[in-house]
Image: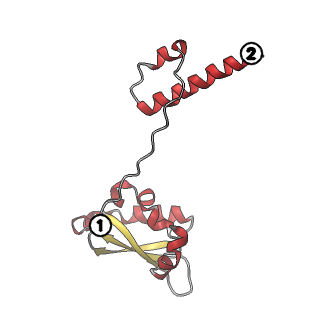
Amino acid sequence: MPEIGRTAFKKFGFVQSSVVTRWPEIAGERYAAISLPESIRFPAGKKSEGTLHLVVNGAHAVLMQHVTPEIITRVNRFFGYTAITKVKFRHGVVTPPKPVQVPRPPRPLKPVPVALGDGLRDIGDAELLAVLQSLASDIDAADDVAKKK
């Protein structure tokens, strides 16, 4: 997306498309669910001390006004310098970002040896169990290789 959207993002005032794509990371999940960056406008000839324009769900505009200093701090921390000093709000409809689904690790192809697998049966987290089973299988395979030498 950064390569494809770069021209469009610059047209609408974004120096980096990552402000839009990483908004939940920058603002936090709570604020990203009710706001969306629209543009950043800098004073003529400058690339600092700009104004961030946000679209905000109508009912949440007052909340966002109260957390404006926090938003400014977070955006400036993302850029690494004082990129913005003001935030302006526009009422609009913001659809919350879809949660990113992390793929599950594949199940081990060969069964875990009984001696190594007994302690793993009580683990309730499926992802942690798969990782530990894989580790147990690797340890068992390393033992087999060591015995053959």
Figure check: 26 above or below 142: below
> Label 1 sits on what residue type?
Val
Report how many numbered discs are placed on residues in the image.
2
Which percent across, then down, holds residue 10?
50, 79
Q: Which numbered dot is residue 123?
A: none
Residue 37 falls left or right of residue 112: left
Crowd around label 1: few <14 · some 14–19 · many ≥20 (10 Å): some
Question: Quarter of the image holding residue 144?
Answer: top right
Front residue of this view, candidates 104 and 8: 104
Q: Which numbered dot is residue 94?
A: 1
Task: Say what secondary structure mark 2 lies in.
Answer: helix
Mark 2 vs 1, N-terminal side: 1
Q: How is the image coloured?
A: secondary structure
Name the residue at 40% across, 64% down: 69
Question: Quarter of the image holding residue 147?
Answer: top right
Figure check: 90 above or below 27: below
Residue under numbered circle 2: 148
**Outermost residue to the front:** 109
**Outermost residue to the left:** 59
Residue 13 falls left or right of residue 90: right
Name the residue at 46% across, 73% down: 85
Name the residue at 48% across, 82% down: 11
Name the residue at 49% across, 73% down: 5
